[in-house]
Image (cartoon, rainbow, N blue to C red):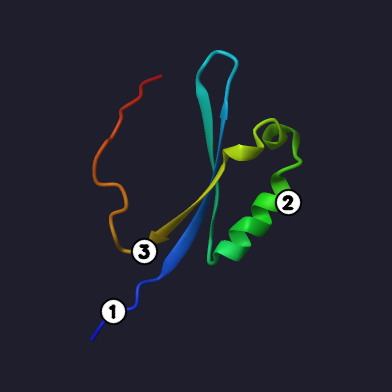
Amino acid sequence: MTEKREVVYVLFHARPLPDGEEEDRLIGVYSSEKRARARQKSLQDQPIFKDAPDGFIIGRYLIGQDNWTSGYVTQSW
């Protein structure tokens, strides 16, 4: 018997900063891609997002499964 895995869609936004760094935002986790895209559309004209309209990323993730297994980076502030 195959176990049905739940899927979520995570909406991120990344934009370059003047000092060469990048600002990343986790906006939300949604039950469907359609809901994630609707949220993206509602935000794209906001001042913080409209300077980087191509910065939106929607990731599809299975619940209960590792989605990032290598390439970890540690940052200190």
Sequence-first disc among 1 and 3 = 1
Q: Which residue appears at 50% of the width and 20% of the height?
A: 21
The answer to whether 10 appears left or right of 6 in the picture is right
Sequence-first disc among 2 and 3 = 2
Q: Tell me, yes or no, whether the two marked residues, 2 and 3, touch with CB atoms within 8 Å.
A: no
68 versus 61 height, above or below: above
Give residue 3's mark.
Answer: 1
Identify the amino acid type marked 3.
Ile
54 versus 59 height, above or below: above
Please state the horizontal and vertical placement of residue 11, each as a whole percent of the image.
54, 50
Q: CA distance from mark 1 to mark 2?
A: 35 Å
Q: CA distance from mark 1 to mark 3?
A: 12 Å
The answer to whether 62 appears left or right of 37 in the picture is left
The residue that mark 2 highlights is: 42
The residue that mark 3 highlights is: 63
Please state the horizontal and vertical placement of residue 14, each as a whole percent of the image.
55, 35
Q: Which residue appears at 69% of the width and 30% of the height?
A: 51
Q: Which residue appears at 70% of the width and 52% of the height?
A: 41
Location of the C terminus (image quadrant) = top left
Q: Residues within 10 Å of mark 3 (few under 14, many from 20)?
A: few
Please state the horizontal and vertical placement of residue 58, each as a whole percent of the image.
52, 51
Identify the amino acid type marked 1.
Glu
Identify the amino acid type marked 2.
Ser
Give residue 71's mark.
Answer: none
Quadrant of residue 74 in the image?
top left
Q: Residues within 10 Å of mark 2 (few under 14, many from 20)?
A: few
